[in-house]
Image (cartoon, rainbow, N blue to C red):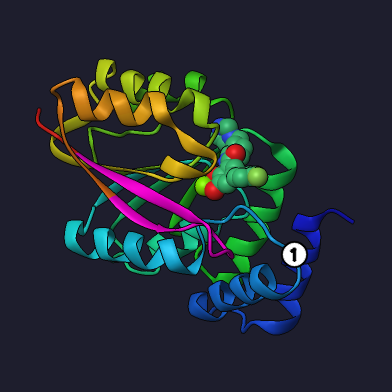
Amino acid sequence: MSKEQRVLRYVQQNASRGDPDSVLAAVDKFGWETEWAMNVGDVKGLILDRFVKETAPQTMLELGTYMGYSAIRVVRLLPETAKFLTVEFNPENAAIANEMIAFAGLQNRIIQITSDSADVIPQLKKKYDVDTFDMVFIDHWKDVYVRDIKLLETNNLLRKGTVVVADNIINPGAPEYADYVRTCGKYDSTFHESNFEYSDDIDGLEKSVYRG
Ligand SMILES: O=C(NCCCCCn1ccnc1)c1cc(-c2ccc(F)cc2)cc(O)c1O
Ligand SMILES: [Mg+2]
């Protein structure tokens, strides 16, 4: 059994079906007490919550579903009318996320796409009926953060005020991305220091508002 399957089993045996907060609490308890996992986690998650509440996005994209933790974390704060798309490259993790999201009762609120983000981003307008995104959360391979934010720009998926949040700016690090959003002139970017998931190590989120 994979680590991700062990996390899902723990959630199914310890959380309440249809209760997103209990699912998040179970994943976090497992991450702190049993096995570390690369969810954004409860500490950085509180900062992400604040950004979501401040932005109140009607359309949002996530790159990097993993087990669905951040998708559940975000969508639990959004109205039923909001449109949330999440992209995962790894089919095994996508399958775990599908079950985790269903257990949380949010399967009708989250559109899961299992694909390479580079292939999906150019299809979002036509195939997924997207105009522009109000918010984006980037949490996939750190070395393609820059490739993908540039793809979002060139495919006209960002608009003046779109909030782009990126995980792991310190650990494992996304230096090329941090440099790009802070110096290219297209974003008002701020770094929010926090702790690495399920650890006392340092990490942080970058929040970058597109100038349009
Ligand atoms: O690699 C990460 N995430 C992407 C996983 C695969 C994405 C697949 N995909 C989805 C869509 N397109 C592609 C990640 C890694 C770490 C980490 C840090 C230190 C360490 F020692 C080990 C691991 C911490 C995170 O918080 C992370 O997010
Ligand atoms: Mg991450």
Residue at image location 51% in from the left, 31% down from the top: 142
Furthest residue toward top:
154
Image quarter where ligand 1 lies: top right
48 relative to 1 in the view: left or right: left
Residue bearing mark 1: 35
53 relative to 161 in the view: left or right: right
Q: How many marks?
A: 1
Provide residue 61's location: percent of width, then percent of height: 37, 42
The image quadrant that residue 79 belongs to is: bottom left
Q: From what the image shows, is residue 153 above or below residue 14?
A: above
Q: Main secondary structure of the magenta part?
A: strand
38 relative to 74 in the view: left or right: right
Furthest residue toward front:
201
Asked if one can make out residue 16 in the rendered structure from this viewpoint, the answer is yes
Asked if one can make out residue 114 in the rendered structure from this viewpoint, the answer is no
Chain part drawn in magenta: 192-208
